[in-house]
Structures are given as C-alpha cells and as structure tokens.
Image (cartoon, rainbow, N blue to C red):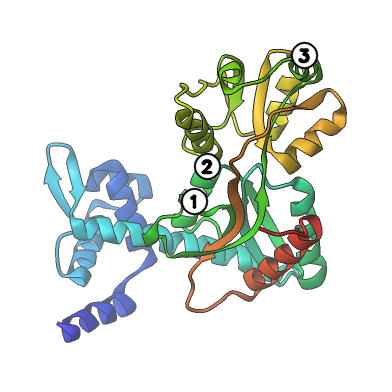
C-alpha cells in the first residue's frame, strides 16, 4: 500500500499540469466536458485527452455521468478541493512575486473582523511596511466569512474570533485581547433610557441593529436572552458594518446596537451616539490572531504576527 501511494505521489509530481486543475474545476462548474472545453477555449479532443490523463494520474474516475451531467466522485471531490487550494496558492505566489519585483519584500492577504479597531490595524500595517517593506491586502468581513476564505487559502492570516474554527481546519490561533459588550444608541434615546429601569424585557422589545446570528456576537445575544427565558430580539437591520451602524444610530432615535466597548468608544466620539447604561455579565470571545498551521513558517507572516501582538499590547495593556 505504501509503495502504491508513493507511485501516486510520483505521478502527481511528474505529470500534473496546472491546466488540468483549471479544466477539472470548469467541468465541476459546467457539469459537462463539452461546455468546459468551450469556456476554456480547448478543443473537445484536447479536453478529453487532458481529463483522461488526469484520471490516469489518480488511477480512478474523477467524474461520473448522471441525470445532472458530470458529477465528481469522492476522489474527484478531494481533487477539486486540492485544486482550489493549489490555484489560490499560485495566485498568492504571483502577488508576492509582483511585490518583490516592485521593490517590496513580500505581500500578505490579511482578514480582520469589523470589531477590530481601524486605528490598531493602520498602526500594524504601517509598521510592517516601514520595518520590513511588506505590503498588505486587508479584507474586512465577519469571523465565519473570513474562516471560509482561510479554508480556500485566499487569506494568509486573519484577526477574528477563534470560536468559528473547526477541529479539522488545521489552523492555529493566539488570543490577543478581550472585549466587553456594550449597548449604544442615539444620544437622545440613551438619555431617555437613563431615566428608566432597563431590563432584558425592555431591551427585547426595542429596534435592534445586529450582526448575523451565525457570528459570535449574534450567538452571544441569542444566548443572553435564551438564558433569561426571553425570546431574543429580531434585528430590524442585520449588519456588522460599524460605519453603517454609526450612520443609522445618529440619524434615528429608535435603534440600538451591541458592540465591543473599544469600537463603541470610537463611535461615541461624535457626541451624537452614547452608551446605554446596561451591563452584561458575558464577554465576547477574545480577538485572536489566526493562521494556517504550516510546516514551514512564512517570515513576512511571522513578522506581522509579532508586530500585531506588540501593537495590541500598546492598545490593550491588560491583554486577554
């Protein structure tokens, strides 16, 4: 069995071509070899020969005919997952090469959730470029969305909440700092609520702006109300964008939202939005630096991780 596996590895190394990977993904997308060939500008005989070569490399069919066209076999599903990762790695390789050819040392694709302070991110990205001439592409999204990008190898690393990582994701994380949840609203609504006795029943009946229930923040809100046997509030507007939340709150006296305390403090600087005097016992999952569990570490990524930790220590001396 070991010798057989080695033969497959040898065939992959010596015979696998990038255009085979592209063809395989296109067949999966189109469900047809003919349509895949047309989309890629291949002749039908060339596409058939390439698929035959691919299946000979793997020693078994990658697709089977069905009423819905060509569908991947279990081996085909594995090959498709690997093909996506390999092609994404090649795209990243191209960006890194462009960075070096234009006088930089490396390029990183970094994800960050909206509840990571923009001031913190700008400080870290400035330092990595100043000290190491590493360029950064920054992607903002929720933790679950960023983890999906990590799984597709579209990101080198991310700053988010590690609660969305699965055991089989082959990622490592380091907790950086904790965040306390607070409620914010238009200053007039916040002032009015200061005069009242606020309870979860009161809050449940109000108009909420919340992130998706799939996010750690959304899950926490659901759990808080569920523990009190109160139906959780259904958001009138579902968003994780701090800019959108800020604009909505300063122009409406009916909405409230839950945010991390440090992000809320930034928003409340405009004096049109204020904290609602209600304290939660719960804490948001810590912000973590998450990256792929690599056998060989990437120097630019190591340097960025170190710089980001140092900047976090400056902004949040208490840590986690």
Pointer 2 residue: 216
Q: Earlier in the sequence, mark 3 or mark 1?
A: 1
259 vs 214, left or right, is right
Taking depth in this image into account, of 214 and 112 the one nearest to the observer is: 214
Taking depth in this image into account, of 246 and 178 the one nearest to the observer is: 178
Number of the label disc, if any, that sits on residue 163: 1
User: Residue at point 62% right, 46% down?
Assistant: 113
Instruction: Please say if the residues under marks 2 and 1 sit with CB atoms less than 8 Å apart.
Output: yes
Q: Earlier in the sequence, mark 2 or mark 1?
A: 1
Around disc 3, counting alpha carbons within 10 Å, would you say few (fewer than 14), some (14 to 19), or many (20 or more)? few
Number of the label disc, if any, that sits on residue 98: none
Q: Quadrant of the N terminus?
A: bottom left
Number of the label disc, if any, that sits on residue 192: 3
x then y, percent, for residue 286: 60, 52
Q: Quadrant of the C terminus?
A: bottom right
106 vs 168, left or right, is right
- Residue 295 sits above or below residue 236 on the image: below
User: Residue at point 24% right, 51% down?
Assistant: 44
x then y, percent, for residue 71: 20, 47
x then y, percent, for residue 284: 59, 44
Mark 1: which secondary structure? helix
Point out the residue furthest to the front here.
197
Quick check: can you spot residue 254?
A: yes
- Residue 207 sits above or below residue 242 on the image: above
């Amino acid at each position: 069995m070991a010798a057989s596996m080695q033969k497959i590895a040898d065939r992959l190394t010596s015979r696998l071509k990038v255009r085979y990977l592209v063809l395989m993904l296109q067949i999966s997308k189109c469900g047809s070899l003919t349509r895949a060939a047309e989309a890629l500008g291949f002749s039908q005989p060339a596409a058939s020969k390439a698929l035959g070569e691919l299946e000979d490399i793997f020693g078994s069919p990658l697709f089977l005919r069905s009423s819905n066209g060509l569908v991947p076999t279990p081996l085909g599903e594995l090959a498709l997952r690997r093909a996506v990762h390999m092609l994404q790695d090649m795209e990243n390789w191209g960006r890194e090469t462009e960075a070096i050819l234009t006088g930089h040392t490396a390029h990183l694709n970094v994800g960050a959730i909206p509840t990571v302070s923009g001031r913190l991110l700008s400080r870290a990205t400035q330092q990595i470029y100043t000290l190491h001439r590493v360029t950064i592409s920054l992607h903002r999204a929720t933790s679950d969305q960023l983890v999906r990008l990590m799984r597709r190898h579209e990101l080198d690393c991310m700053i988010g909440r590690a609660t969305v990582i699965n055991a089989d994701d082959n990622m490592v994380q380091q907790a950086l700092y904790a965040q306390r949840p607070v409620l914010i609203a238009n200053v007039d609504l916040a002032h009015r609520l200061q005069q009242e006795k606020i309870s979860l029943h009161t809050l449940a009946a109000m108009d909420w702006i919340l992130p998706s229930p799939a996010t750690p923040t959304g899950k926490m809100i659901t759990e808080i109300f569920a523990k009190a046997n109160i139906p959780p509030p259904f958001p009138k507007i579902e968003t994780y964008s701090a800019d959108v939340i800020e604009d909505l709150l300063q122009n409406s006296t009916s909405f409230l939202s839950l945010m991390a305390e440090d992000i809320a403090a930034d928003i409340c600087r405009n004096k049109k939005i204020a904290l609602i005097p209600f304290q939660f016992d719960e804490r948001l999952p810590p912000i973590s630096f998450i990256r792929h569990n690599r056998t060989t570490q990437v120097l630019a990524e190591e340097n960025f991780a170190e710089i980001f930790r140092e900047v976090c220590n400056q902004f949040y001396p208490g840590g986690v």
